[in-house]
Image (cartoon, rainbow, N blue to C red):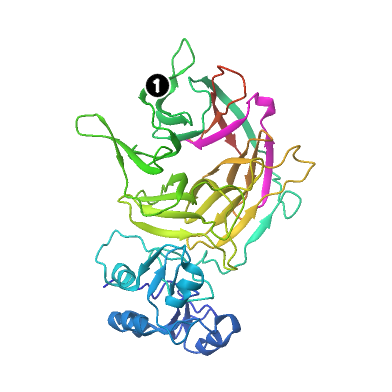
């Protein structure tokens, strides 16, 4: 059986002492000393939390049997029968009938098999901190407690809580390049010399990031036509994952031993429509996907489901993030995803002309939401189209409507808003950092027939 991570924190969460550490709150993901156990358990928000001793946690059969015998906290005469992967907690038959019938669930035997008995050492733990409504989850062994989601999320705007830089930030274009595409809807850097670009009409191109001398055009070294991609992601070895709009599956594009391109479909662990995709840089086998019900628009109904999920490269489902701790939807329509050092950043489109940026920690708890620019900074509503993270963990958001970059701190405060008008970029919609820390920005369709999108290479210093 797998061992639960019972000693993540090195000090008591209540008194900060490092002695007599004997207990673990399974909901709060914190370690508690012997003296503070009662105080933690009797605190009003924690009354229904499960506090276990280290002996109980490390006694695997005891913990598994305890879970099987636990009465439902909402329906005390019922025992848990399933694990709701949408809400991330155990449910009984009554819970399922009352509010989980449209959610993804697994039988409790499968839940226990996968999370307490499995010998698969490569499997990433799947749970975030639970809501106060129900039950038990497990920790990632390599997770730190500095970002455990215990702080309330913060909403940020340029007119509230902004922190502007006192040091000089320099942004300059190194070069601009012509392409064959009408728009560059996504950029993925493969290595120092190669990148993947695509547009929604159906072609994926691998380009060499060294232009030809005569035409100043980035040479296409591979072309994959007719795949109708909605979004793409590239892992560390250059394999391409993309969302196919034809069958709404995740496809894998890679070369076989004979250097021939092969396209295959990943197993489909969800019943929703995939909208965006991202491969983690820290954990190459983890793939994040934004989902919504088929035919979704910007309105929420009782049948709406707007999620981001993570899966392994073999298609196994890991995480599902959909609701906040207050049981409110986290997303209206997930548009882009990126990640960095345990944080997940999601562009959430509110309608066709506005959106926000949502920062989540590794448990799916919202840390902040950035939106609503002050009229003095922007003429049009904030329309984020792509997001990247700098080496110093600042966040750069591309605002297509205002032709600008928004540089945010790790805490979601606006550091700098930089217009791109002076660089003569028309409708920027995609961007990515390369290995040399240069920022590549791709332009979108400007409404002119037969127009060709450009790719710009920027150097940014001071952040």
Quadrant where the N terminus is found in the figure? bottom left
Q: Which of these two is toward me, 338 or 170? A: 338
- Residue visible at 57% across and 34% down in the picture: 429
At label 1, counting other C-alpha atoms closer than 10 Å, the crowd grade (few under 14, some 14-19, many 20 or more) is: some
Could you say which quadrant of the image residue 254 lies in?
A: top left
Residue 204, given in percent of the width and then of the height, sits at 41, 29
As displayed, is residue 183 above or below residue 99?
A: above
Is 17 a magenta residue? Answer: no
Quarter of the image that includes the C terminus:
top right
Residue range highlighted in magenta? 413-435
Q: Is residue 138 visible?
A: no
Give the residue at the far left of this rendering.
258
Residue 421: where, in percent of width, then height? 69, 28
Q: Which residue is mark 1?
A: 220
Identify which residue is drawn at 36% across, 48% down: 284
Above or below: residue 448 compared with residue 366: above
Report the front residue among 307 and 456: 307
- Asked which quadrant contains residue 454, the reply is top right
Judge from the rendering whether residue 12 lies leftward or rightward of residue 297; answer left or right: left
Of residues 109 and 159, which is closer to you in this image?
A: 109
Left or right relative to 155: residue 304: left
- Secondary structure type for disc 1: strand
Residue that lies at the very extreme toward the right in this rendered image: 376
Please, is residue 254 above or below residue 143 in the view?
above
Residue 196 in sight in this render: yes
Q: Position of residue 383 (x, y in %)?
A: 65, 41
Horizontal side of residue 58 vs 137, given as left or right: left
Residue at (34, 81) in percent of width and height: 68
On the image, the x and y values in percent for residue 384 come to 61, 42
């Amino acid at each position: 059986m797998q061992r639960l991570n019972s000693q993540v924190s090195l000090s008591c969460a209540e008194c900060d002492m490092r002695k007599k550490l004997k207990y673990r709150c399974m909901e709060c993901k914190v370690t508690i000393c012997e003296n503070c156990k009662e105080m933690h358990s009797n605190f009003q928000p924690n009354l229904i939390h499960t506090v276990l001793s280290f002996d109980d946690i490390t006694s695997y059969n005891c913990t598994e049997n305890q879970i099987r015998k636990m009465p439902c906290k909402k329906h005390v005469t019922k025992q848990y029968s399933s694990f709701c992967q949408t809400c991330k907690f155990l449910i009984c038959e009554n819970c399922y009938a009352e509010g989980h019938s449209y959610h993804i669930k697994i039988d409790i035997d499968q839940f226990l098999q996968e999370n307490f008995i499995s010998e698969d050492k490569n499997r990433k733990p799947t749970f975030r901190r639970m809501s106060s409504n129900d039950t038990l989850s497990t920790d990632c062994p390599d997770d730190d407690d500095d970002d455990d989601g215990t702080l309330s999320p913060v909403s940020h705007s340029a007119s509230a809580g902004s922190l502007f830089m006192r040091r000089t930030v320099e942004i300059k274009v190194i070069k601009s390049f012509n392409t064959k595409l009408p728009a560059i809807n996504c950029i993925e850097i493969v290595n120092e010399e190669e990148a993947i670009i695509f547009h929604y009409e159906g072609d994926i191109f691998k380009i060499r990031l060294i232009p030809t001398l005569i035409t100043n055009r980035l040479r296409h070294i591979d072309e994959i036509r007719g795949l109708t991609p909605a979004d793409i992601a590239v892992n560390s070895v250059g394999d391409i994952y993309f969302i196919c709009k034809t069958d709404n599956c995740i496809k894998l594009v890679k070369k076989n031993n004979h250097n021939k391109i092969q396209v295959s479909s990943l197993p489909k662990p969800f019943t929703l429509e995939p909208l965006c995709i991202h491969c983690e840089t820290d954990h190459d086998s983890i793939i994040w996907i934004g989902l919504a019900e088929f035919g979704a628009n910007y309105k929420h109904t009782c049948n709406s489901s707007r999620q981001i999920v993570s899966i392994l490269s073999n298609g196994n489902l890991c995480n599902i993030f959909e609701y906040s701790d207050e049981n409110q939807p986290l997303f209206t329509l997930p548009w882009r995803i990126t990640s960095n050092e345990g944080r997940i950043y999601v562009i959430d489109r509110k309608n066709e002309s506005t959106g926000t940026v949502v920062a989540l920690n590794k448990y799916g708890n919202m840390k902040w939401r950035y939106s609503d620019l002050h009229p003095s900074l922007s003429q049009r509503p904030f329309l984020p189209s792509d997001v990247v993270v700098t080496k110093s963990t600042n966040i750069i958001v591309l605002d297509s409507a205002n032709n600008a970059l928004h540089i945010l701190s790790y805490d979601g405060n606006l550091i700098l808003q930089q217009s791109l008008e002076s660089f003569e970029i028309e409708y920027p919609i995609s961007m990515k950092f390369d290995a040399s820390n240069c920022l590549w920005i791709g332009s979108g369709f400007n409404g002119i027939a037969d127009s060709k999108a450009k790719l710009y290479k920027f150097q940014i210093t001071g952040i």
